[in-house]
Every structure is written in structure tokens, then in C-alpha cells.
Image (cartoon, helix red, strand yellow):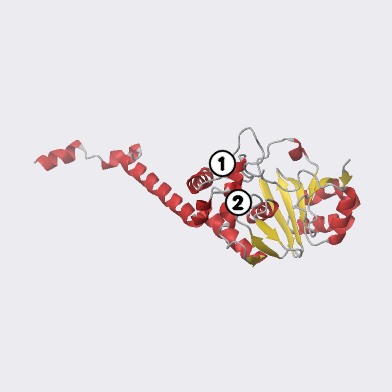
Amino acid sequence: MSHRFATVFPDLAAEIARLLAEKGEHALAASVRQLRLEARCRCGDSFCATMTIETQSSLGVVSTEHRNVVLSTSPELVLDVVDGKIVQIEVLDRENVRSRLVELFPHAGNRGGVTARPLGAADKRTPMKPVTAEEFTRRLEALCLSGLGPALPRRQRDVHILLRSVVMVLREGVVYPEREVDEAITSWLAAAGPRVSIDRVSFRRHLVTNGYLARDAAGREYRARWSGNERQAFAEDVEAVKPLDALWDAHDRAAARKLTAATEHPPAHVAAERAPSIHTLAELVL
């Protein structure tokens, strides 16, 4: 049974509609009163009151556009918008909202955040080997150069490789404030290049949901966990990989290949300009 969001959380619904209107998101603001709750987040954090919304996007329709609308950062209030519809509301540090959600959904739903299946644990018929440094680097480069987002990769192995590469920008075991975590993700996005369209807020959420970032009870500090939820998922040689250097090098090689191809096989009009005319050849002979 779904519940009308504005009925369960009238104050929060009014706040979201007001903040959306202030941002010029009038269509989204008008849709708030029609939203129906589907489930709550399954991350287990005591400060998390994130909720998913019942929409067509949750019923198997392939999405073509995804974006985040950040309404507040303290406390955090972020909307996931897919194809122009609100599909998830990320709410942190609002105990009254969380308590009410738990009453409505005693058991967390299955859609409260995209969770990668642990490597090697899901299919006993085809056990998955640990990711090696060679595979890690090769797949990371392929994912970022070929284009990625707004959703995570379909292959669970690629999801782990991607998230591990992001968290490796941070030092394992060190506690970071949210600002420094966001700076690290921004650095990774710069190295990944323009073909990656997963935004910083989504990456941070995916890292937390999949165990690569452990968030404190207050939701303000994070500890990096390179192994995520499954320590055996990666071979030891992966620790020596420098993801940012690997990505920058991959872009340099791609640019060099493009330049070589352009030089060896120039467009027809350029080739014509380079070719000497018969008149010019005759002058050279004379």
C-alpha cells in the first residue's frame, strides 16, 4: 500500500514545493502534492530518512534523463529527478521524518539506493574471480572513455570497479568531512572526463550505500573503505593503481591516437589542399 507524501509529511511537502519554486522548478513544485511513497532507504543509517517515490520510472520504464536537485545541504535535502519526475527524496538528519517512515515501512524497501551485488557471492554456478590491477585499469578506462551515466553500469563487476576507483582518491581509514569527500569526487570527475554524467551527490550516495564510505551517526564525516562490503573482491595489486593518473593517461593516449589518425587520414578537403597541383609540379621541374 502506497501513501500520499503530502498527507504523511505536509510540512516537508510544503517546504520542498517552496524551495523548488524558488529555483524556478515550477513543474516539479506542482507535482509534489501528487507524489506517493513507495519505500524507505535500506542503508540502515540512523540519520537517513531517504524515501523512494512510486512513479512509472520504478515500473521498468527505461530512463533517458537523470539529475539531482539540491534543495538544502544542512540538513541535506536532495531530489532525484528522472525524466522530469521526482523518483527519490534524500532526507538526512530529520528524526521526525525517519521515525514516521519506519512506522509506515517497518522493513526497508528494495529500492532505497542502488546497491551493487557483492562480487563472487551472487552466483555459485559461475564464481567471480577477484578483480586484478590489469582488469581494474582496463575496465575503468573503457567505462569513462566510452561514456557512463546517469545510471551506474549494468555489470555488477563494473559497478565495483567504478566505485572503488572513486574512493581510492581518498586515503583508506582516514576520516574526512563531507566537503573534502565532495572535493575528492570532483577531482575524480575531472579526470574521468566529460563523457561521465553521474553527478557528485549521486556518487557520494552510491559510495555510502555500497560500503565504500562509512558515514558517521551525525552524517557529517566519512571514512574511506577501499574494499567496500566485500574485501575479497579485489586482488592485492589493485592497491597500487592510481586511478586519477590512469584516467589522465588514458585521455592523453586517446588524444594522441586521434591526432595520428587525423594526420594519416585527413579529411578530403584537407588532402586536396595539401596535394600539389599539376601547375606547381611543372614549375618545380622547370
Classify 117 as above or below 187.
Answer: above
- Distance from disc 2 to disc 1, alpha carbons, whole Å, reads 18 Å
Q: Position of residue 47 (x, y in %)?
A: 79, 60
Which residue is at a point 87% across and 42% down the rendered structure image?
2
- CB under 8 Å between discs 2 and 1: no
Numbered circle sitting on residue 163: 2
Which residue is at a point 28% across and 41% down the rendered structure image?
273
Mark 2, Cα crowd under 10 Å, few <14 / some 14-19 / many 20+, is: many
Numbered circle sitting on residue 27: none
Q: Residue furthest left?
A: 286
Secondary structure beneath label 2: helix
Please tell me how many numbered marks the rendered image carries: 2
Between label 2 and label 1, give the one nearer the viewer. Answer: 1
**Residue 92 in view:** yes
| In the displayed structure image, the side of residue 208 where residue 133 appears, left or right | left
Seen from the viewer's position, the closer of residues 63 and 242 is 242
Name the quadrant of the C terminus: top left
Which residue is at a point 58% across and 52% down the rendered structure image?
164
Q: Position of residue 34 (x, y in %)?
A: 85, 45
Name the image quarter holding residue 222: bottom right
* Sequence order check, earlier mark of 2 and 1: 1
Q: Residue under circle 1?
A: 129
**Residue 9 in view:** no
The amino acid marked with disc number 1 is Lys
Classify 150 as above or below 213.
Answer: above
The amino acid marked with disc number 2 is Leu
Q: Position of residue 117 (x, y in %)?
A: 67, 43
| In the displayed structure image, the side of residue 242 where residue 73 appears, left or right | right
Q: Residue furthest top?
A: 125
